[in-house]
C-alpha cells in the first residue's frame, strides 16, 4: 500500500475512533482492522497501526467492563502527527 494511501486511511480511522469512542462495536471493528494492517504492512507503515489498535482495544474493553477509561487522545495525536507529511496538501481557493 502506498504511503499516501496509508496516511489517508490512518487519518480517517483516527477520525472514526474519535467520533465513535462510545461505540464498542465500532471500536472492536477498528481494533481488528488496525491489528490486521499492522501485521500486513509491518516495516512499510507510515503510522503505528499497533498504537491505533491499542487505543481501540483499551477503550473497547473498558466500555464492556462498565468502567470506561478516557480515550488515549495523546496517542491519537501522536499518530496524527506521524502521518502529516504523507497527506496531500490542501490548496487554498
Image (cartoon, helix red, strand yellow):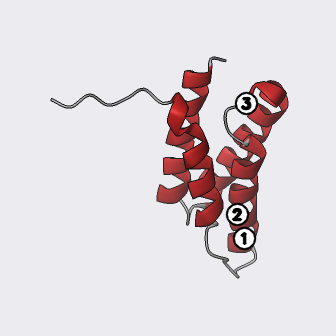
Q: Is residue 41 above or below residue 66?
A: above
Q: Residue furthest bottom?
A: 67
Front residue (pair 79, 17)? 79
Give the camera-side residue of 90 and 52. 90
Where is residue 66, by image quadrant?
bottom right
Q: Are marks 1 and 2 in contact (CB under 8 Å)?
A: yes
Neighbour tally class for label 3: few under 14, some 14-19, many 20 plus, Cα within 10 Å: some
**Position above or below: 43 against 33:** above
Give percent across and percent down for residue 87.
48, 30
Which numbered tag is attached to residue 45?
3
Viewer-proximal residue among 2 and 66: 2
| Up-down relation of residue 28 to residue 47 (above or below) | below
> In 3D space, how far apart are the residues under numbered discs 1 and 2 (Cα atoms)?
6 Å
Give the foreground label among 1 and 2: 2
Which mark, residue 60?
A: 2
Report helix, strand or loop for mark 3: loop
Considering every residue shown, the one lying at the far front of the view is: 85
Which residue is at a point 66% across and 77% down the rendered structure image? 68
Residue 22 lies in what quarter of the image?
bottom right
Crowd band around label 2 with a 10 angstrom C-alpha radius: few (<14), some (14–19), many (20+): many
Left or right of 16? Residue 75 is: right
The Cα–Cα distance between marks 2 and 3, rounded to whole angstroms, is 24 Å
Which of marks 1 and 3 precedes in the sequence?
Answer: 3
- Image coordinates of residue 15 in percent, x first then y, are 49, 49
Disc 1 target residue: 64
In this picture, residue 31 sits left or right of residue 5:
right
Q: Sort mark 1 into few (<14), some (14-19) or many (20+) by Cα contacts within 10 Å.
A: few
Which residue does the image show at 15% across and 29% down from the upper left?
Answer: 93
Amino acid at each position: 500500500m502506498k504511503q499516501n494511501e496509508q496516511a489517508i486511511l490512518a487519518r480517517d480511522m483516527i477520525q472514526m475512533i474519535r467520533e465513535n469512542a462510545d461505540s464498542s462495536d465500532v471500536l472492536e471493528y477498528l481494533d481488528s482492522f488496525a491489528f490486521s494492517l499492522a501485521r500486513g504492512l509491518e516495516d512499510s507503515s507510515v503510522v503505528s497501526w499497533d498504537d491505533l489498535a491499542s487505543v481501540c482495544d483499551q477503550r473497547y474493553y473498558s466500555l464492556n467492563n462498565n468502567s470506561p477509561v478516557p480515550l488515549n487522545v495523546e496517542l491519537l495525536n501522536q499518530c496524527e502527527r506521524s502521518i502529516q507529511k504523507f497527506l496531500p496538501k490542501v490548496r487554498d481557493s
